[in-house]
Image (cartoon, rainbow, N blue to C red):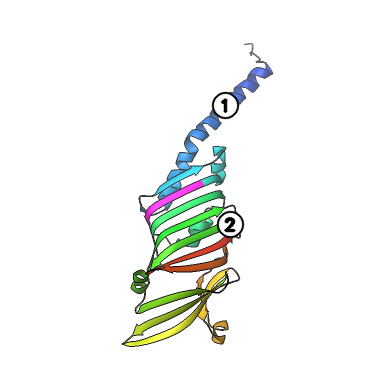
Amino acid sequence: MTRVRRPPWMIAAAVALVVVGVLLIAEATLPAIATDRVRSSLHGDDVSVTIKASPALELLFGQADAMTIHARRLRPTGGRGLADLVARTSETDRLDATVDQLYTSALELDRVALRKRGRSLFARADVSESSIEGALPVQLHLSTTAEGSQTLIIDASANVLGHTIAAKLRAQVRAGKLEIAPDSAVGELVHVTVFGDPRVHVDSIAAAKHGTVYTFSAAGHLTG
C-alpha cells in the first residue's frame, strides 16, 4: 500500500491551525476558569472578580495583567490572613480590590481598598470607635498625631472599673513591620508587632479621624 506523502507546507498549515485553535480555546475559557477559582477562594457575600490577561495563556502560569475584585462582605478563612491574600496576587501587575466590610480577627474594617501596581501596594480602611470598643474588653478612646510617614503617636484612654487610664503609644514602621510600643524609652524594649510578614514590607503609615471613624492607610511592597 502506497503511503501518501503530504507536502511540508500542508503539514505546517495543519500544525498552525491546531495552535490557533488551542489559543482561541484558551482565550475563551481560561479567564472564566481563573475568575471562578479566585471567586471561590474568597469567602464572602456578593463577590465579583474580573481578570484580564493577554495572551490568556499567562493564566496557566499564575500571571495576569489586571484583576479587579469587589465584595460586600469578606471574612478570610482557612487560616488565610490579609498577608496571604496579598501575597497570592504577586504575579498580577495591576490589582484593584474593594471590600465594604472585612472581618479580621475580632475587628471589623469598613470601606477597605487595596491597590497594587507592580510590586507596590497601597491600602486604606475605616475603623469605627464602636468596632474598636467591641473588640476590646474596655471602652477605649483614641486620637492620633502623625510624626513623619513612619510613626503615629496615639493618645489612648480607657475606662476601667470607673477609673480613667491614659497612655501614649507609638505606632511605627520598623524593618518592614508595623509595631506598637509605649511612647517612652521603655518602648525600645517593649513593643508588639501588629503586622509582620516576610512577603509584605510596610513602608509608611498614616491615620485621620472623621467624627467617630478612623481612616488608616499604609503603603508598602511585595518582597518576593
Residue corresponding to mark 2: 120
What is the x, y in percent for residue 80? 45, 60
Q: What residue type is labelled 1?
A: Val
Q: Which mark is residue 202?
A: none
Under circle 1, the secondary element is: helix
Q: Which of 63 and 206 lies nearest the eye of the viewer? A: 206
Give the quarter of the figure containing the C terminus: bottom right
Residue corresponding to mark 1: 18
Q: At x 54% / y 83%, what residue is drawn?
A: 187
Give the quarter of the figure containing the N terminus: top right
Specify whether residue 80 is painted magenta: no
Under circle 2, the secondary element is: strand
Q: At x 56% / y 70%, what residue is drawn?
A: 177
Q: At x 54% / y 43%, what residue is drawn?
A: 59
Q: What residue type is labelled 2?
A: Ser
Residue lying farthest right?
A: 8
The span picked out in magenta is: 67-74
